[in-house]
């Protein structure tokens, strides 16, 4: 939700609250994935880039697959037209979401080499680049944790300078995350994407 809408909800809950109640009730008989896909299509129809990025991220977090997103866009072709579908795909490509990589669609994810594990102290956090993607790596009590560097809100790539202790704060909208768990602890309600990891021959790998 935008800062403006957040303000209106606080300033005029008597008026704006009815609007959000209306939206919630409209989809109460739909499963969450269907609601999310409809929201994605609506944002493409209105060509609202910020909203499209936000609702696309939410759809993926709630279990929608990239193929389901693409199918929803293509099935809405009579309403959207090719130009708006291409507009949406251009944004998806700009977001550099590994789930939408042509090799990953219909195929298996791959392991990517991150770094040597020697010399990493328990609790230490590092930002690592690998194969065109950045991740935050932490050696926790239960093993290695690898989190995507992109904020789940609008996929802003969070820099290492945004890390203070175990708290990572997105510079764009101040969503903050605890890298001990990946949970969002300020502003938002979505955790960082965590990638599966393994150690092979003394090197840490992550799969995406």
Image (spheres, rainbow, N blue to C red):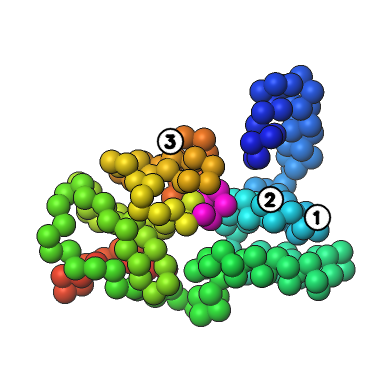
Q: Is residue 162 above or below residue 135?
A: above
User: Count of labels shown?
Assistant: 3
Distance (Cα) linking label 3 and label 1: 31 Å
Quadrant of the snapshot with the N terminus: top right
Q: Residue at the spot x=67%, y=69% of the render?
A: 89
Residue 20 placement (x, y as % from top left): 74, 33
Disc 1 designates what residue? 46
Image quadrant in which the C terminus is located:
bottom left
- Residue underneath mark 2: 51
Relative to residue 184, is residue 96 depicted above or below? below
Quadrant of the rendered structure where residue 68 is?
A: bottom right
Q: Is residue 182 visible?
A: no
CB atoms of marks 1 and 2 within 8 Å: yes
- Name the secondary structure under disc 1: helix
Which one is in front, 4 or 135? 4
Element at label 3: strand
Q: Pointer 3: residues within 10 angstroms few (<14), some, or many (20+)?
A: some
**Secondary element at tag 2:** helix
Distance from label 1 to label 2 (Cα)? 9 Å
Q: Report which residue position mark 3 lands on.
A: 185
Bounds of the magenta segment: 152-156
Residue 23 x, y percent position in the rendering: 76, 38
Q: Indicate whether residue 29 is drawn in magenta.
A: no
Question: Measured from the top left, where is residue 194 in percent x and y?
Answer: 39, 55
């Amino acid at each position: 939700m935008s800062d403006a809408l957040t303000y209106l909800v606080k300033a005029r809950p008597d008026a704006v609250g009815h609007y959000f109640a209306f939206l919630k009730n409209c989809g109460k008989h739909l499963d969450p994935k269907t609601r999310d896909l409809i929201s994605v299509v609506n944002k493409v129809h209105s060509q609202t880039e910020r909203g499209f990025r936000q609702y696309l991220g939410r759809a993926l977090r709630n279990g929608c697959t990239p193929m389901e997103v693409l199918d929803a866009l293509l099935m809405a072709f009579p309403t959207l037209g090719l130009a708006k579908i291409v507009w949406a795909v251009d944004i998806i490509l700009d977001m550099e979401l590994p789930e939408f990589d042509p090799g990953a669609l219909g195929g298996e994810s791959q392991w990517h080499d991150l770094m040597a594990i020697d010399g990493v102290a328990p609790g230490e956090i590092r930002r690592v680049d690998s194969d065109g993607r950045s991740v935050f790596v932490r050696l926790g009590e239960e093993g290695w944790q690898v989190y995507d560097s992109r904020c789940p809100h609008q996929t802003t790539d969070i820099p290492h300078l945004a890390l203070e202790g175990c708290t990572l704060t997105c510079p764009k909208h101040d969503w903050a995350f605890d890298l001990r768990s990946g949970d969002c602890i300020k502003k938002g309600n979505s955790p960082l994407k965590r990638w599966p990891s393994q150690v092979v021959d003394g090197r840490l790998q992550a799969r995406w």
